[in-house]
Amino acid sequence: MKLKLYKAIFVILVIFALVVATLIFIKYSRNYQNEKENSRVVETFSKEILNKESNIENVEMQGYRVIGIVNIPKINLTYPILDIDTYNPEETKEPLKISIVKYWGGNVNDYGNLSIAGHNNYDGTMFGKTKKLEIGDIVELTDLNKKTIQYQIYNKFVTNPNDITILQTKDKGIREVTLITCTNGNKNRLILNAKEII
């Protein structure tokens, strides 16, 4: 009787392990496809920048307009920035699965604070490696005018998800970018502030 019980428990554990492994495989294969698509869009955007007569305002990714490129050399991160035209957290879920999104603010490289958000993926994709960044590290933003500006991180902290003070523009006369990602099992937000290097 005990032997049958142990066999049944073993079979259940094996089935559970297979289901979990399958779900993990599906998630990471989806991330892999997103990474390929992000790389393709960045390459297209970069080629259009080199072409003096091209119009990069028409570059899209899965139906979302690409408004710029974020590059962080220290962690080998380069992604398109998607314009989602909404600040409703429910409506940002889908585009956040695809790439980095403009969360708040004006256009890329405008004066004031531009907030961009990305998932903290366990495999290190999107903003999964931003926790390795430190004060003094560089963030580069390329805009639709084909201009790249370097920003230097001056602040790094964790806050709660409802803290909207991170979106406020402290000085409209300077260019700033705020990187936002989740941390602590999505209970908090990791915030990195950077301002233009002049």
Image (cartoon, grey):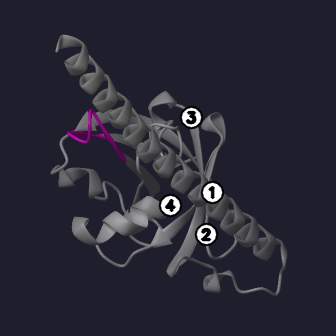
Residue 190 as seen in the image, left or right of residue 31: left
The amino acid marked with disc number 3 is: Asp
In depth, the one of 187 and 135 nearer the eye is 187
Residue sitting at x 62%, y 84%:
57
Q: Are marks 4 and 1 in contact (CB under 8 Å)?
A: no
Residue 175 as seen in the image, left or right of residue 167: right
The amino acid marked with disc number 4 is: Ser
Q: Is residue 54 above or below residue 174?
A: below
In depth, the one of 128 and 70 nearer the eye is 128
The amino acid marked with disc number 2 is: Asp
SS label for mark 1: strand
Q: Which residues are magenta?
A: 181-189
Disc 1 designates what residue? 149
Disc 3 designates what residue? 137
Disc 4 designates what residue? 99
Closer to the chain start, of discs 2 and 1, is: 2
Residue 164 as seen in the image, left or right of residue 48: left
Q: Are marks 3 and 2 in contact (CB under 8 Å)?
A: no
Quadrant hosting residue 95: bottom left
Closer to the chain start, of discs 4 and 1, is: 4
Closer to the chain start, of discs 4 and 3, is: 4
The residue mark sitting in front, 4 or 3, is 4
Residue 153 as seen in the image, left or right of residue 181: right
